[in-house]
Image (tube, rainbow, N blue to C red):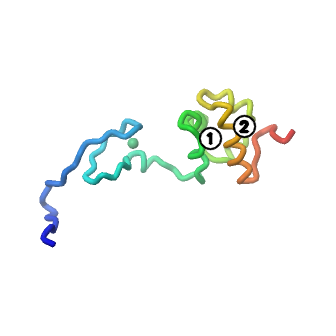
Amino acid sequence: MSERRNPKAKTLHKTLRTCKNGHKYYKSSDCPTCPVCEAQRKPNDGFLSILSAPARRALEAKGITTPKQLSAFSEKELLALHGLGISAIPKLKTALAAKRLTLKNDLV
Ligand SMILES: [Zn+2]
């Protein structure tokens, strides 16, 4: 085809977008991925991805990003975190069980 791109031509149709975290970025394709969020995302076995956004933020604010770190907390301590509701507990326990871990004081 004759649609060869001239590297010097800056005629790419870029649009300014704002992601859900407020980052502004330009994209020429319709890919919705924010490059800033993408760069900040750290793989953690999908551990935090099972949670709702408020619960995830609550754990991250506490420095909890892995099941191992989570296992140092008791259910009571976790529920005291702002944003983390009772519905998150079963999910967390499931994630811990998958790693053969439990919450603190969770054996009795
Ligand atoms: Zn972003």
Describe residue 84's horizontal placement relative to residue 41 as left or right. right
Quarter containing ligand 1?
top left
**Residue contact at pointers 2 and 1, CB within 8 angstroms:** yes
Residue under label 2, please give it: 73
Describe residue 25's horizontal placement relative to residue 79 as left or right. left
Q: Secondary structure at mark 1?
A: loop
Q: Residue at x 40, y 38 (%)?
A: 20
Question: Within 10 angstroms of label 1, few (less than 14), some, or many (20 or more) residues?
Answer: some
For the residues marked 2 and 1, what is the alpha-carbon distance in whole angstroms? 9 Å
Residue under label 1, please give it: 64
Picture coordinates of residue 95, whole percent (x, y):
68, 48
Q: Residue at x 19, y 51 (%)?
A: 13
Q: What amino acid type is highlighted by mark number 2?
A: Phe
Does mark 2 have its CB less than 8 Å from ligand 1?
A: no
Of all residues shown, which one is farthest toward the right? 108
Picture coordinates of residue 28, whole percent (x, y):
25, 52
